[in-house]
Image: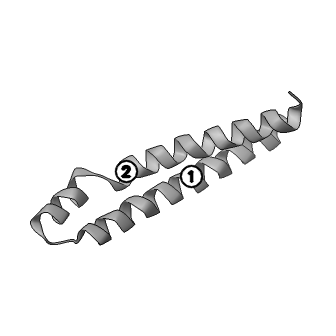
Amino acid sequence: MDQENKDKIEAAAAVTVGAGAGSAGGATVGVLELAAQGAATALSASLVIGLGAAAGGAIAYGIFRFFKKRKS
């Protein structure tokens, strides 16, 4: 496996971990509780969770690129 493929795998892993953390942050008990009470719909709760995942993935990728540049 060459270095380019290793870099792609590392970037994908960083984004996956970040998206998982973002999803967990978006799926806090508060958002789910509001959806259960009807104060927020299932759609709005899903949007919050999805946006959390997207933001987490983007932040993790940015941090990965920042440290990858510093290392080189």
What kind of residue is marked 1? Gly
Instruction: Name above or below for residue 21 compared with residue 31.
Output: above
Q: Nearer the viewer, residue 62 or 26?
A: 26
Mark 2 burial class by Cα count in 10 Å: few <14, some 14-19, many 20+: some
Q: Which residue is mark 1?
A: 57
Q: Cβ–Cβ below 8 Å for labels 1 and 2?
A: no
Numbered disc 2: secondary structure: helix
Is 3 drawn above or below residue 23 in the view shown? above
User: What residue occupies the far left of the structure in this picture?
Assistant: 37
Query: Which x, y percent locates residue 59?
Result: 58, 53
Q: Residue at x 19, y 64 (%)?
A: 35
Measured Cα–Cα span from mark 1 to mark 2: 12 Å
Q: Residue at x 10, y 65 (%)?
A: 37
Please identify the quadrant where the N terminus is shown.
top right
Asked which quadrant contains residue 36, the reply is bottom left
Which label number is shown at residue 1? none
Q: Is residue 45 left or right of residue 17?
A: left
The one nearer the camera, 52 or 69, is 52
In the figure, is residue 6 to the left or right of 21?
right
Q: Which residue in the structure is indicated by mark 2?
A: 25
Residue pictured at 16% horizontal, 58% vertical: 33
Q: Tell me what residue is drawn at x 43 percent, y 61 percent.
A: 50
Which element carries disc 1, helix, strand or loop?
helix
Specify few, some or many for label 1: CA neighbours under 10 Å numbering under 14, 14-19, or 20 or more: many
Amino acid at dot 2? Gly
